[in-house]
């Protein structure tokens, strides 16, 4: 097909930007995003997600494009837009639909459209293809071709990056699959697995995070059980991890755009196929209920109408990503119980939190709280002066085991999972 393809990556978020920069080391690549401020920031060498440094951006040959007309010479389009769930935990494909309409207006004979967005098995060919066909007037598999390569981005992970992990690819034809293998392989030393077909590749992605979700749900459930027995789950896990084949999962709030979302896509596909996904949805119920369970334990230990400080708001430590954070559920549960709650997170963007959740985070922790909740283990939280933050008799609610190995100041109370 194409020896030197011109590639456009649509969506320059946590997934699209690292991918586009990695591919631009080997091909002519254009990056497109509907957020014009995002394009302006990237051109200035600023990545608000923190995934890439200024040097990585300024040294890259990646061209940031705001004008769709400039994309019409592309041979290959890679769509990397978000796929969240709606209020009923059903797949929300509006961004995929919009991106498909956009790309459909640009493709021509011989174009290849690859999806990296996490979807349910069958979505690329059954949902996306008709949109591309309607917008382009072309026929998928005849005039243009589909591909799928599930993203495996782990926000904040500087080791398992897109150019150093195995990339699964699939194509609508064998020829397309081989071409995608060559293109993705150029950026990661040919560490590519070619799946049997697109539906198989979609399914492989769907189970990756569902498996993690179920394992974390098990640990969260035993945290609840052992908590009633007066045993710390962290102490139990520390001992259990000495066995060579014990899986080292940790308890806590399970949010984010992957583990807290992808299982619902798999459950949706199962129900479409007439199968009730009992294990998958059971794990989701446990993890989605964890914020309320933690809030209830804090309420048991804290005074009525307490002044509470939550440390951390992002879904994960040391990343600014607030998508689908479950800390909001914890905050709302504590407020519903009559407490006054403040949030401190030096990693997250205060304006983004305000716009998304209507919350004003504090610039710096105050003094004399009745309770401090360690919800997200950002670097530096372990060294905070607990005695200065809390009233005498105040509660240290250590959700993530931040202070387990630290001597708690005399006069303060300590609770952890």
Image: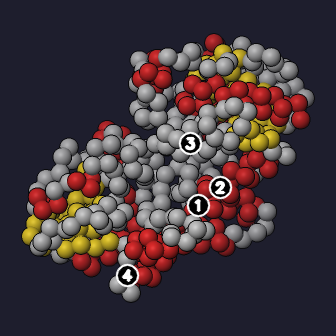
How much space separates mark 1 and mark 4, taking CA atoms? 24 Å
Query: Mark 1 vs mark 4: which is more N-terminal?
Result: 1
How much space separates mark 3 and mark 2, taking CA atoms? 15 Å
Q: Which residue is mark 1?
A: 212
- Decide if residue 195 is on the left or right side of residue 384: right
Q: Which mark is residue 231?
A: 4
Q: Secondary structure at mark 1?
A: helix
Residue at the image point whose x is 73% and y is 52% from the top: 204
Image location (x, y in percent) of residue 82: 57, 41
Give the class, few, some or many, for how many residues have Cα within 10 Å of label 4's Cα (few <14, many ≥20): some
Image colouring: secondary structure
Query: Mark 1 vs mark 3: which is more N-terminal?
Result: 3
Is the N terminus in the top left, top right, bottom left or bottom right quadrant? top right
How much space separates mark 1 and mark 2, taking CA atoms? 7 Å
Residue at the image point whose x is 32% and y is 53% from the top: 312
Q: Tell whether label 2 touches label 1 (CB within 8 Å).
A: yes
Image location (x, y in percent) of residue 357: 36, 49
Q: Which residue is mark 2?
A: 208
Q: Which residue is mark 3?
A: 160
Of badges 3 and 2, the one in the foreground is: 3
Residue at the image point whose x is 44% and y is 70% from the top: 238
Give the class, few, some or many, for how many residues have Cα within 10 Å of label 1's Cα (few <14, many ≥20): some
Q: Is residue 332 above or below residue 312?
A: below
Q: Secondary structure at mark 2?
A: helix
Q: Tell whether label 3 touches label 1 (CB within 8 Å).
A: no
């Amino acid at each position: 097909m194409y020896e030197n393809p011109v590639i456009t990556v649509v969506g320059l978020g946590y997934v699209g930007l690292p991918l586009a920069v990695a591919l631009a080391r080997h091909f002519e690549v254009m990056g497109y995003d509907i957020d014009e401020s995002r394009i302006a920031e990237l051109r200035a060498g600023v990545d608000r997600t923190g995934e890439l440094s200024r040097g990585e951006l300024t040294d890259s040959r990646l061209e940031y494009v705001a004008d769709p007309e400039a994309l019409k010479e592309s041979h290959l389009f890679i769509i990397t837009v978000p796929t969240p769930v709606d209020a009923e935990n059903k797949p929300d494909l509006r961004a995929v639909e919009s991106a498909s309409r956009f790309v459909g207006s640009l493709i021509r004979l011989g174009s290849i459209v690859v999806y990296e967005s996490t979807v349910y098995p069958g979505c690329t060919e059954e949902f996306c293809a008709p949109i591309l066909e309607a917008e382009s007037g072309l026929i998928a598999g005849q005039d243009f071709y589909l591909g799928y390569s599930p993203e495996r981005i782990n926000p904040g992970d500087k080791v398992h990056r897109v150019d150093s992990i195995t990339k699964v690819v699939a194509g609508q034809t064998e020829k397309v699959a081989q071409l995608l293998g060559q293109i993705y392989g150029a950026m990661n030393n040919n560490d590519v697995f070619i799946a049997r077909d697109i539906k198989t590749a979609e399914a492989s992605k769907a189970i990756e995070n569902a498996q993690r979700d179920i394992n974390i749900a098990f640990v969260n459930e035993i945290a609840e059980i052992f908590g009633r027995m007066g045993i710390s789950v962290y102490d139990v896990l520390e001992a259990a991890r000495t066995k060579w084949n014990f899986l080292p999962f940790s308890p806590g709030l399970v949010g984010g755009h992957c583990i807290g979302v992808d299982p619902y896509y798999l459950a949706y596909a199962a129900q479409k196929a007439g199968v009730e996904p009992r294990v998958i949805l059971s794990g989701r119920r446990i993890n989605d209920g964890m914020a309320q369970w933690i809030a209830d334990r804090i309420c048991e230990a804290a005074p009525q109408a307490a002044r509470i400080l939550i440390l951390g708001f992002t879904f994960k430590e040391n990343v600014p990503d607030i998508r689908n954070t479950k800390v909001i559920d914890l905050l709302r549960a504590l407020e519903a119980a009559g407490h006054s709650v403040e949030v401190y997170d030096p990693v997250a963007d205060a304006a983004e939190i305000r716009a998304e959740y209507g919350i004003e985070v504090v610039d710096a922790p105050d003094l004399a709280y009745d309770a401090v909740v360690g919800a997200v283990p950002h670097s530096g939280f372990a060294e905070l002066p607990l005695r200065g933050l809390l009233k005498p008799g105040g509660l240290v609610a250590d959700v993530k085991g931040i202070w387990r190995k630290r001597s708690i100041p005399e006069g303060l109370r300590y609770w952890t999972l």
